[in-house]
Image (spheres, coloured by chain):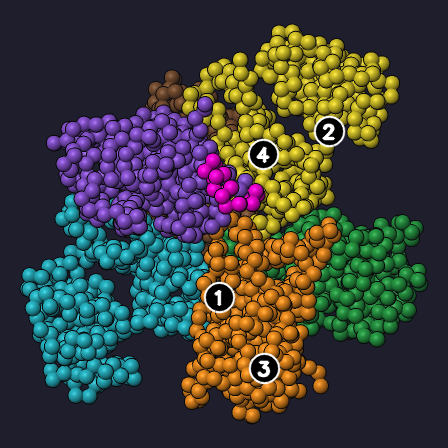
Chain colours: A brown, B cyan, C green, D orange, E yellow, F purple
Amino acid sequence: MQRLNPFQIAQQQLDTAAEKLGLDPATHELLRWPMHEIKMVLPVKMDDGSTRIFHAFRIQYNTARGPAKGGIRWHPDETIDTVRALAAWMTWKTSVVDIPLGGGKGGVVCNPKELSEMEKERLARAYIRAVARNLGVTRDVPAPDVYTTPQIMAWMMDEFETIVGEAHPGVITGKPIPLGGSQGRGDATARGGIYVTREAAKLVGTDLKGKTMAIQGFGNAGQHAALLGEEILGLKLVAASDSKGGVYNPKGIEAKALVDYKLRSGVLQGFPGAEEISNEDLLAMEVTVLFPAALENVITKENADKVRCKISCELANGPTTPEADAILYDKGVLLLP
Amino acid sequence: MQRLNPFQIAQQQLDTAAEKLGLDPATHELLRWPMHEIKMVLPVKMDDGSTRIFHAFRIQYNTARGPAKGGIRWHPDETIDTVRALAAWMTWKTSVVDIPLGGGKGGVVCNPKELSEMEKERLARAYIRAVARNLGVTRDVPAPDVYTTPQIMAWMMDEFETIVGEAHPGVITGKPIPLGGSQGRGDATARGGIYVTREAAKLVGTDLKGKTMAIQGFGNAGQHAALLGEEILGLKLVAASDSKGGVYNPKGIEAKALVDYKLRSGVLQGFPGAEEISNEDLLAMEVTVLFPAALENVITKENADKVRCKISCELANGPTTPEADAILYDKGVLLLP
Amino acid sequence: MQRLNPFQIAQQQLDTAAEKLGLDPATHELLRWPMHEIKMVLPVKMDDGSTRIFHAFRIQYNTARGPAKGGIRWHPDETIDTVRALAAWMTWKTSVVDIPLGGGKGGVVCNPKELSEMEKERLARAYIRAVARNLGVTRDVPAPDVYTTPQIMAWMMDEFETIVGEAHPGVITGKPIPLGGSQGRGDATARGGIYVTREAAKLVGTDLKGKTMAIQGFGNAGQHAALLGEEILGLKLVAASDSKGGVYNPKGIEAKALVDYKLRSGVLQGFPGAEEISNEDLLAMEVTVLFPAALENVITKENADKVRCKISCELANGPTTPEADAILYDKGVLLLP
Amino acid sequence: MQRLNPFQIAQQQLDTAAEKLGLDPATHELLRWPMHEIKMVLPVKMDDGSTRIFHAFRIQYNTARGPAKGGIRWHPDETIDTVRALAAWMTWKTSVVDIPLGGGKGGVVCNPKELSEMEKERLARAYIRAVARNLGVTRDVPAPDVYTTPQIMAWMMDEFETIVGEAHPGVITGKPIPLGGSQGRGDATARGGIYVTREAAKLVGTDLKGKTMAIQGFGNAGQHAALLGEEILGLKLVAASDSKGGVYNPKGIEAKALVDYKLRSGVLQGFPGAEEISNEDLLAMEVTVLFPAALENVITKENADKVRCKISCELANGPTTPEADAILYDKGVLLLP
Amino acid sequence: MQRLNPFQIAQQQLDTAAEKLGLDPATHELLRWPMHEIKMVLPVKMDDGSTRIFHAFRIQYNTARGPAKGGIRWHPDETIDTVRALAAWMTWKTSVVDIPLGGGKGGVVCNPKELSEMEKERLARAYIRAVARNLGVTRDVPAPDVYTTPQIMAWMMDEFETIVGEAHPGVITGKPIPLGGSQGRGDATARGGIYVTREAAKLVGTDLKGKTMAIQGFGNAGQHAALLGEEILGLKLVAASDSKGGVYNPKGIEAKALVDYKLRSGVLQGFPGAEEISNEDLLAMEVTVLFPAALENVITKENADKVRCKISCELANGPTTPEADAILYDKGVLLLP
Amino acid sequence: MQRLNPFQIAQQQLDTAAEKLGLDPATHELLRWPMHEIKMVLPVKMDDGSTRIFHAFRIQYNTARGPAKGGIRWHPDETIDTVRALAAWMTWKTSVVDIPLGGGKGGVVCNPKELSEMEKERLARAYIRAVARNLGVTRDVPAPDVYTTPQIMAWMMDEFETIVGEAHPGVITGKPIPLGGSQGRGDATARGGIYVTREAAKLVGTDLKGKTMAIQGFGNAGQHAALLGEEILGLKLVAASDSKGGVYNPKGIEAKALVDYKLRSGVLQGFPGAEEISNEDLLAMEVTVLFPAALENVITKENADKVRCKISCELANGPTTPEADAILYDKGVLLLP
């Protein structure tokens, strides 16, 4: 059986919802597709004087409720179907919480780890030059996402402002704070998940204080989840992993110490007093709360039955496939948000 | 072996040319892809009050030499790869004849035969509403193409002028003449082919007068080729075919009579004094000049060795695949243009 | 003696005010006329395939204090002088309450009751297409008015956003709430009148609790006046009328019951326990508060001396002519607002 | 019987033509009205420091065939119906000669003779400031007309260019030649009439050489008609009149001498060797060619039966009413153009 | 030794700061110069019909942190270097208090005292016409400054709104309040200085109540400083001076009485009960607080050692030169702000 | 006595002309100054990662007759006064030959010889980014000038087109021909001078055939002057010089050979069969025609009396100062153009 790509998954989810809602066929069909897709190739000068060609996308999935909103991903394995799916999910998200925005997403097929700072700047500017006509506070407002940073947002904003010939800081979110970025953006994803976990725990009558948590993916969202899970929920961090492997200590790991260690050394392995584990070990760990905070599709129908948490609070975009959702649901896992 | 789609064919052709030219890798790679692709879904009200969703494209393949130029196709089997290929070919064409335009192409997946006039108007306007920001005399100038008519161009121009709030007749070519259309557009494709055939015949020392021609595809281009081949080159029409079949008369068919017959009855079959033949028969006919005037990819490596004309003058976009080109070339067929 | 049209009345009112204010002649003359008037004819496709021509107006009376603000009326008897007068009154209104807006008004000569939903949509869009260049949050912001609904505003907003190519929800007020409409707009007109009545009654030392009210015109404003007059002021509804006639019950009519009855049956007549009266009867009724909530010029010098209310709180635009105002004033009626 | 205003006359003419053409009712109705009418009041500072309010119009009658084209009139008796009629006639004119323009006209109610040069400049600029958004080479291109001069056009162009922030000399025609005005505009109206007269005379077999002409209205068009009628057609000028009266000499008047006299003295009366006549006398004179070159509606059903020319070549806008046309036609007068 | 012009002083100040900050050389060099300077000549019609040519500037010193902000000065001795310096200081000011604006300044070389109101209006409008393309809420927002008034701002705003064709009140600050001006602008400069003085006095433990103040420059800022110094700080006004001389009364001068006297008579001299002093006397006076509120560069290395105040709170732009700053600092004067 | 800068010279020339013309004082004063001057600093990334700050100008001297026109100079000694003067001269030039353009000029203070190609590209783009708002076919159309090449124009055009989002090849002249450059631009300056020399020689009755020419400055203009002087006028080239020195051969130098030599070796010295001379020698040479084709102000009152040519045809901008002009004139030299 062929594996579905992320956009096919997103369409299946919509189909299920549409059937339950009794959505009229025209609206259903309209929502199954991006309203406006832009695909570009970007020629960019490398530091050695050569020119490289990058493939890039911007999807404005649906703007009926307001300007599109969604990040720009830089990843060597980026595909248009991933971007379509994420743009669809942004549309549902802005709609469910009733903010006057539509959903969008962008991507560039590139490996930022192989680009110098000056090459990144030129790529960021090239992206905006190609798509500027479609952006702005009344059209589409990008944001940082996988491998795109506040510095990249600053270059993008500067390029957009040059092209439109005016100050237009609202064209992009996730800017550095001195250039108009929002206070609190740093821990917003994690904080949102922590609050949802807190409220959900109240609803089901679970006392989280002193219970355990494990974090899969220890980038920005995962690190803040560790810190805030400890601070706000009183959870004890027992395991964390990133793309290079993880660490485990059943007696608890001090969140701040682990964050400092990761920032200093770039990896989790070797953290004093913890044993090394794999990502798969982590997902299968018996904890009260699991925070999947890495990428999409890490919990699938192949490994879902090994998951043993009580609550799974998703901080990444779509870490669990629909089939895995169903399996976890049947096992009684509380799926958030 | 998997059949290549039209865009893969176009890329192969480019690869061959790039190798011969010693094109630098960056330019070569840049030319292998559309610079700017737009994909849209268009919700359109049907006459019965329902809404239908149409998939539509606009490809601005490359605009380094000037605004994009290329038609808008309405066809139930339209694919983005066909549109990409045709847009690439428009880029090469405008460049080879050194007019300051780039190449583009558009398409809508729809069956115009199942749409009322009012539905066609609403679809034409919806297309322009979705893509207007990218059009105009300095950006991209569409034209009629498969199943799109001067009337459809008129609706598109009107919608564009409403959106930009000014007279802008240059946004589209192929308009009705009273609205600014060009004199002579009707037979321009055919006339160009006839002139090329005349000049090529001179070069190779062939006297065409009284020789035979066969026409594959008897729409606008094919009909004018018949009339002008007779009038300008003195060729004798011996066979013609369209999607429903063809007719053959070795003694010659009066072009005007056949055109009138087709316009009156909608088909070629039944034309007095001619025997019926298939499309494949026509391609295999021994004639001096063959005019493939239907669609792309009708002469392929499967049937190319049956072709027996001396000159093949292509009036359709890409009727012969690259492999077929090679076979015909080896057989000594003069391929035009 | 010739009857003055509404704009002549508005000019007379201004002349009186200018004299009292000692307004300089240039400013006075400038305020006597619309600064900017647009008259259009709109060709619109009917469902039967025919085309009809509609006459339409937009008056931007004066924008010295900010963008024009005022509704769009659809009425078979619409005239440009009515629209001019209403635009002038909008100018005085926005100025008196010191909000940074000027005054405007629009109209289309049409009978919405004879148009299908799809025809209404096409007419709404045609209106915006003709006038878009003059609208927007910094120029002129229309609103619903006689026979124009939130749905019509939604079509107008969508057309405007298509033309300008960006989200611009502020171009029009009175939109449906999910598209950005304001909470509370439904009862705003009535609630404003009720508050004015409450404050005025305090000033003149009248206790309204348990006193009577009659409502002329039982559309949106009239219905909410009935409900809120009961709820906020403690008034007893004794009579109400609409364009087809009225009902009367000296013992009181429960406002909610009458509103439900009207919404269900479309008329007031036949409401259980009430006797039928004419509009003229209603105006002549002895009540504490009369709410004229229908159209302009219903209380004139012909019928003003029959009015027997203590307070007349106008919810329609200009229901009382200047001569009638004078007569009521002389009779000691408290005229609001 | 009430006299028709010019616009009602224009509508009647259209009705007659529509009936003969079998025009479909929607197109007929659409053509009976201006598509887009703008009415403004313009506050202008006078030299004495006071402010005066001027009423002004711009009618874009129909732009289906291209941007509107038509003059701006400054006249104390200007009415919107005159401007509407002239705008309609411009629409028919541009259409009949098949140039890609629609029809427009503008007007300001003012007496230019009572304004200083600086006041005229401020009025000209105020007009453009109020209407600029609707002008430009792709929208509407004004021109000089009654009492508006090349100098006024220069002020208007300068104001428009300031507002749009770019050189845009095409916004207006009739500019001074050093600012981009057209060579030959000075005598264009007269020359066109003279050519039409020459061709018409050929068609009906009349030899004009040595025959007589009379000219009603001796402004720019009339003066050039005299000079060119003499030079090109060999006609003998026997009479001419302007608003203050006319002169007559059956032996012939040298055109250049009369033009010089008029330019020097401002009047025609007193021209050496000629007797004084009234305007009515002139119209009733027995001449081969009569050139009505003053204003509209000077030949009416009251005086048409007195006209005794063989050819009447109209250089003014609509000098002959429809009823007068019919009378002249019945009398065998050749009406041009 | 040559005296430095204000811009050279501003550059020296920056150099000193850059050295202390260890600013990187590129940023330092970039900040030493205006990013964008515009110099214009403005032809303006005088009331007598002649035309005069005015030299004008607008400096957008640096807009990295947001749109430029800064006043427009009208002064017969205006120079581009003064405007550059003031624009630089505006950049530091908006940055230090962290508001998202850059720094700008404008100037016109003219003597407003010799211009009539109508000439001032024409000059104000001419300035905006020349520079409009560079202004607006997202580009550059001027304000009143030396010899420019709220009325001049109103003319400028009106001209800008005419050019852009929309309400845009944010283009300029310091407008009359009915046109959107800010409440409290009148005393904002003085009030800011008073608050700074109050806080600084707290920090250094000085009780200002009953202490003395002297005010150099008795225009808007100086007058409000007198009033608010008395009201908020409890200071006793003992001396004040303007360009024509000053007054002194060691027993104290009631601020409101002196303000009224100045507004009535135009001068300070002759104020009852006070003795006359020169500007130099005033600067040398022994007072607790000195408010320099006139122009730049009044306290220089030539007179700085005569200054005998304890606190100098600068209300003018740069009244003290850098060398004077150093001298005052060495003498222990508390320099504010 | 202080030497005048080029702009002071240009103003003096205007003053002389104005006096002779009796120009009204306001027009004279207006023409003495640039209407619109823009000064910018441009931060540009160097290849080594550092940032350098460049000072740049664009002067739109006067645009009354049409958009500004004039080159962009890159020179280490560029000053704003040189640019002002050249912009003034462009104004006079476009006016004298009556083309509908005004005069402009731009400059960047930089040494192109010390910049890599990538740095030049970034500088060219930075210039356009800073000034784009003021350019375009209706505003200001730059061109190449000292040290700016067709390649630099191509970068500038590309940057402008990116910013405005449309094809706009007319924004700049001197582009490479494949991107829309004009045929014949290469030798246009020289060819114009040659034609003027030919016509002037006819007027004064001089036969140039076989006479001698010397060329001061052997860049593009000088080289073409040599070739065309030989080809069109039959002149014999006897001397040429550039910034590094010159060569002389009284028997004549074949123009094509010398051009090839210069292109190959970069210098003139060492050309076979010619003796070396200095620039000063060249100016003092006795020849029929001297072509000063280097920079401004090379013939001054210090060396003018040594000039011994009969005709001096200036191909550079202002090579002769006004005082030198007078001296040459007195000596009977024919000064062209």
For the residues beneath circles 3 and 2, the answer to whether they share a chain is no
- Name the amino acid, label 4: Gly
Residue located beneath label 3 in the image: D249
Position above or below: F156 against B157? above
- Name the amino acid, label 1: Arg
Q: Give the letter of the chain under mark 1.
A: D
Horizontal side of residue C46 vs E295, given as left or right: left
User: Which residue is nearer to you in this view: F63 or C24?
Assistant: F63
Distance of label 2 from label 4 (alpha carbons): 20 Å
Q: Which residues are magenta?
A: F11-27
Q: Secondary structure beneath disc 3?
A: strand
Distance of label 3 from label 2 (alpha carbons): 78 Å
Q: Secondary structure beneath disc 1?
A: loop
Dividing the picture into quadrants, the one containing residue C103 is bottom right
Residue located beneath label 4 in the image: E106
Residue E220 tag number = 2
Would you call the spot at circle 3 few (<14 residues within 10 Å), some (14-19), or many (20 or more)? some
The residue sitting at the top extreme is E331
Horizontal side of residue B165 vs D9, given as left or right: left
Q: Earlier in the sequence, mark 2 or mark 4?
A: 4
Q: Give the letter of the chain under mark 2.
A: E
**Magenta-colored stretch includes residue B282:** no
Q: Secondary structure beneath disc 4?
A: strand
Q: Are marks 4 and 3 in contact (CB under 8 Å)?
A: no
Position above or below: B69 against D229? above
Would you call the spot at circle 2 few (<14 residues within 10 Å), some (14-19), or many (20 or more)? some
Q: Secondary structure beneath disc 2?
A: helix
Which marked residue is nearer to the observer: mark 3 or mark 2? Answer: 3
Which marked residue is nearer to the observer: mark 2 or mark 1? Answer: 1
Distance of label 2 from label 1 (alpha carbons): 59 Å
Residue D185 tag number = 1
